[in-house]
Image: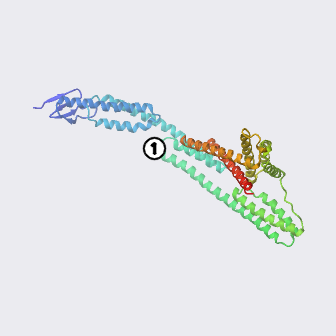
Amino acid sequence: MNHLVKNEYGFCQDGKVYINAYLNFPQREIGFVRNTEQEALDYFVNRFELAKTKVIQLASEINDVQNKGSYLTKVVQMKAYLAEFDGLGDFQPLFTQLDSLEVFLKDLIQNNQIKNLEIKRALIEDAKLIAGQEDVLQATEDLMELKAKWVKTGPVDKKYQDSLSENFQEVMDHFFLRRRAYFEEKNRQIDEKILTLQGYIDSVHQLRKAEDLDDSIIKVKELQKEWKNVIGLPPKKQSMLWKNFKKANDMFFEKYNRVKGIEYKPRVDPRIQELTTMTGELELKLHDQPNMTATADLAKAYLVKWKEITAQIKSVDRQMAERFRNVCDKIFEMNYLLRVISYRHPALNEKPRIEQLKIMINQMDYMTKKERGELEDFIAQAENDRQMEEKPIISKINTQKRKISMKELLLTGFKTELDALLNA
């Protein structure tokens, strides 16, 4: 005798649990009875809540996300999951909800694909216009930006996808063939100009060996004029060739002046001369200890003047600039040292030189160690805060290192002078 225990959605029979047919799904076995039939039915009724929760979660996700179209596959997969889910409950509302979501997402995808089709067709037309621009470099940059937009634009209907991609790639390929030809021609022109300039250099060397130097100097000056007309080379190559041309000219005029008995005095830019004079004056005053306050004021004024003059000059010799900066730093550090010492030794300059040096060495040594310790603490804190790559932090560290370095240089000088006096 078959014992039957059932509820609204399924039943137990012969030790097995079945789900009733619903929608277009036939009746099927979903489990077996472990203890009692009622416990088995209750277990699968409770298990149905899992399926219900998954559908609710999926619907919620679709509602919240921006890129809803990507969830169509998940909806289809959820329907397949429910069709084979072992549980007892009202599956029909869940399938109805999933069917609605599927229709909604398909319509959304279709509308998006229509918009994407319009966007990509417009991008192809824009690409054609850009590819036709005369400025190849600007066109390259613009096309790269446009390509990024193309990649970010979503998919279109499959029947348009291949033809659109082919059309876009055709425009890009055609442009980059043109771009390659452009650079090949540009490189050819550069090679021509290099040969021309090298020819001028060789010509100057040959003219230096000529017997008629008066005729040669006319030709050299013509070559100098011609040189200015050859432009458009890479800066490094232009600079290298110019150095060689200048060297050839210098050798030519050196021989010409020697043969003609002309004493050549190189022209010095008065602005450069003024920078040199300022630097030399401060270097002399660095040793004028009693008037260091006035010297520090002069150094501040010269710093302002230096910036004004160098702004008018194309380039300043790096060694001269470093020399000027060093003497200014030394003056400022020396002035600060004397100001600190004056609080305890107001009559420092009246003391014997050996005593002055001992006082200055002790104070400078203390200040140097103190500032170095503070700098190490600052660097450690910056590393802990992960600020070592920030420009203000780097600038402050470099400034402090320079100040400490100048203090150490002065300290070394004091010690050297003291040793000389003690051993005299």
Rendered view: 15 above or below 166: above
Q: Position of residue 78 (x, y in %)?
A: 34, 36
User: Which corner quadrant of the image does residue 37 belong to?
Assistant: top left
Q: Is residue 262 left or right of residue 234?
A: right
Nearer to me, 177 or 286: 286
Q: In this view, does 336 lie to the left or right of 274?
A: left
User: Which corner quadrant of the image does residue 420 belong to?
Assistant: bottom right
Q: Where is residue 119 in the image (x, y as percent from the top left)?
A: 54, 40
Colour scheme in use: rainbow
Q: What element carries label 1?
A: helix
Q: Which residue is drawn at 60% across and 52% down?
A: 175
Nearer to me, 409 or 318: 409
Q: How crowded is mark 1: few (under 14 residues within 10 Å), some or many (20 or more)?
A: few
Q: Which residue lies furthest to the top in this view?
A: 8
Q: Which residue is drawn at 53% across and 39% down?
A: 118
Q: Which residue is drawn at 31% across and 32% down?
A: 50
Q: How many marks?
A: 1
User: Which corner quadrant of the image does residue 201 belong to?
Assistant: bottom right
Q: Residue furthest right?
A: 261
Q: Position of residue 139 (x, y in %)?
A: 63, 48
Q: Name the residue under label 1.
A: 158
Nearer to me, 328 or 32: 328
Q: Where is residue 302 in the image (x, y as percent from the top left)?
A: 79, 45
User: Is residue 422 among the parts visible in the rendering?
Assistant: yes
